[in-house]
Each structure stands twice: as C-alpha cells, then as structure tokens.
Image (cartoon, helix red, strand yellow):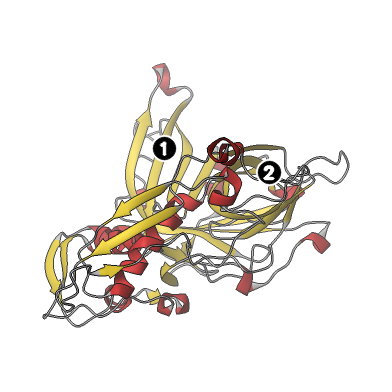
Amino acid sequence: MSSNYQIFFDNQPADADFYTSISLLEVEENMDLPGAVELNVPVSRTEAGDLTYVSDDRLRPMTNLAVVVSASSSDSSRVIADAASVPCRGDSGGTGAQCIFDGYVLSHKLHLNTGVTDSKLKVWGQDASWLMNLTEKVKEWVNVSDIDAANSIFGDYGIIPAEENSDEDSPSHNEFGHSLMQRATDIQFLRALARRNGKFCRVVCTDKPGVRTGYFASPKLDVKPVTTFSITDSETWNVQSLDLQWEVTAPSAVIARQALFTDPDPDGASADSSDTGLPLLGDRGLANFSGSPMTVLLAAPVDEGDELTLRAQSLLRESAWFVRCEGEADIARLGVVLRAGMIVAIEGVGALHSGKYLVWSVRHMITPDDYRMKFVLVRNAVGQSSTGGGGGLAGLIGA
C-alpha cells in the first residue's frame, strides 16, 4: 500500500504494536456534518482475565484522537498541490501530510462471541466541534454581524477563524431592529447561522494535529481541480466506480418580500432572485437545464434588504446541487488524499457529466492491506448537451 498513516493519542503517536492490532480504521468528512472516526480492534482475554483494549487508557472517554495520512502516486502529473484550490480547509491540497481527523473518543461498542473468539471493539469519536456542543446557552448578540459572532465563538475554543469567513458578511444586528438570539449550543447556533447565510460551518484540522481552523464560509468553486478522475480508459483509470445522477425537483428562483421597521414603504424590501451568487461548475445551471424554473416564496424577519438577499441566496444555494456523483477510489491508484471541500474533475463520462465537482463527503477506509475512499461529489451545473436545446418541460410549457 503506497500510503501511510499515523494515529495520535493526546498528541502522542501510537506505538508500532497498536497498528498491527487495527483491523479497520474509518474516517468520514462532510461539508455539512461533523467529522467522525471509527477504530476496530480485536479483543482477547489477558492472563489476568481482563479484555484487551476495553480498559485501555488511550481509548478512555474524551481522549484526543488524531489521524494523519499521506499518499504517493506514480502519475504525479495529474495532481495539482495548490493550497488555494482546497476551499474550506488549510492544507497542501491532498498530496502532503493530511490531518483527516482531530477529535475525541465518545463511544465504545463491544462485541463478544463464545470463548471471546473473533470478538472486537469499535471505538467511535467526533471531531473537535464536539467541544462546542457541551453547553446549551441563551445569549443575545447585539451590534455584531453573523461573522463577528462566528469568529468570536471559534476564538473561545482556541480555533483559528478562516480568512474566508470575512466574505459575504451579514448586516450588523442592533438593538433598534432584530438582535441575534442564541438558544442552543455554540456549534448548533453557528450551523443554523451558516445555513441561513448560504455557508458551511466546519471545524477542520490542518496538516498538524491540534491546529484547528473554523470555517464559516461558502465553498470556493472558481479554482483549479486538485485531481482528475478517469474511469473509461482501461490503462489510465484511477477510480473503481462512479454513479452519477441529476434531479430537477428543487427551486431555482425565489420571490422574497418583507416589511421593514426602518422603511415606511408598504411594499417593504424585495430580493427576488434566481442567482445563487456562486460560480457554476459547468455550462448550464438548474433552471437552464430543466427548461423551466421552480419558484418559491420567502418571507424572513430582517432589518435590511441586503440581509433578505442573503436569505434568498442561501435557499437557492441549498437547492442548487442538483447533480450528484458517488464513487470509490484506491489511494494507491489515485495518489491523492481526498478531503471534503476540494474541487476535482471527472473526464471521459460524456459532455453532460464531465467537468468540475465539489467533494461533499469522503469516507476513508484503511485496513492492513489497502486504503480506499468512498466519496460523494456534487455539482451545480451540467455541460452542454451534444444535441443542444433546453429541458423538455420548456417545450411543453411553451407549446
């Protein structure tokens, strides 16, 4: 296996004997969910009659557990190690050391068979955002924007706010309009704020365990792909399988209206939009491809028209990912450690589906014999059809 990995317990590397005991190590990263880890080790009886690993101090509750991996590839020309092309993270782009998990042990599941033969222990943990989920709070935020609140909360936990957080800020919430009320844990509060701003809230590790970055930002889509997936060539393929689908049942336009305390106009503010504010990853977006937009109504308590525009865009961004691709790759063949938030490309799958994609989630599966990655990609556009023309529904409506 042309890759290697390290496990750290409370910032100390695991000893060599521990690696020989691991039957399966899984790490999952998501754009919209906390990262998770699962470690499977065999269980046997000791001479003293106890069970191995069950009472191991390294696997006690709230132990800091980190996983760092690296990859190599004989086809290095396909890899672009550009940190700027890896949004919502702060690493080297998939080819150097990657801290794919930095979090805490939260659960044990022990399975025992007769005579303790073929018994195993599953150790499960969640990323460092769990620390932000321990206390529910009631707090009023006044004279701050959403980004001000996010960066302040990240700082309370020693998490470095990402530079991208300063993009697309909301207006300040002041006492003369709607202040910002928190009635949740810090991470629940930030994820709700991020969703209504069309952003993602994540806490990720960089290349070094313990160095954590807090993202309250939208993905960067106008960057070069970190790598290109190829499946159709029998000699140069680097992914084992791809399943692609599209669905045009989500809204692509918003009619947004809201009366404002600060504006006597009876019509209030208007933020009608069909623009997500994000660049397309292909030639045709949802409305263009479907042939007819689906329009929804939006009313939200806001103090300014700009804030209503953000709400409208957030709704459209959530529904814009109408193309989805699921697949699997071996790291020895791909040569890149995939991370949620990367931009990758797919080639050779036809004009409609070839092009750039956002990595939505990755499940890293490491065994003594191999290292595989199951991934989900999303896209807010498709390519040009070889026959041209819009969706069939447009023709029916226009008939």
Q: Amino acid at mark 1?
A: Lys
Q: Residue at x 11, y 80 (%)?
A: 175
Name the residue that disc number 1 marks. 122
- Whether residue 210 is visible here, answered yes or no, is yes
Q: Residue at x 87, y 38 (%)?
A: 234
Residue 212, image x and y in percent?
43, 70
Q: Marks 1 and 2: in contact by CB < 8 Å? A: no
Residue 218, image x and y in percent?
46, 66
User: Which residue appears farthest toward the front when viewing the image?
Assistant: 399
Mark 2: few, some, or many residues within 10 Å (few <14, many ≥20)?
many
Nearest the viewer among 69 and 9 is 69
Q: Secondary structure at mark 1?
A: strand
Mark 1: few, some, or many residues within 10 Å (few <14, many ≥20)?
some
Nearest the viewer among 1 and 172 is 172
Q: Residue at x 54, y 39 (%)?
A: 24
- Is residue 41 found left or right of 190 in the rendered image? right
Q: Secondary structure at mark 2?
A: strand
Name the residue that disc number 2 marks. 329
Q: Amino acid at mark 2?
A: Ala
Numbered circles on residues, count: 2
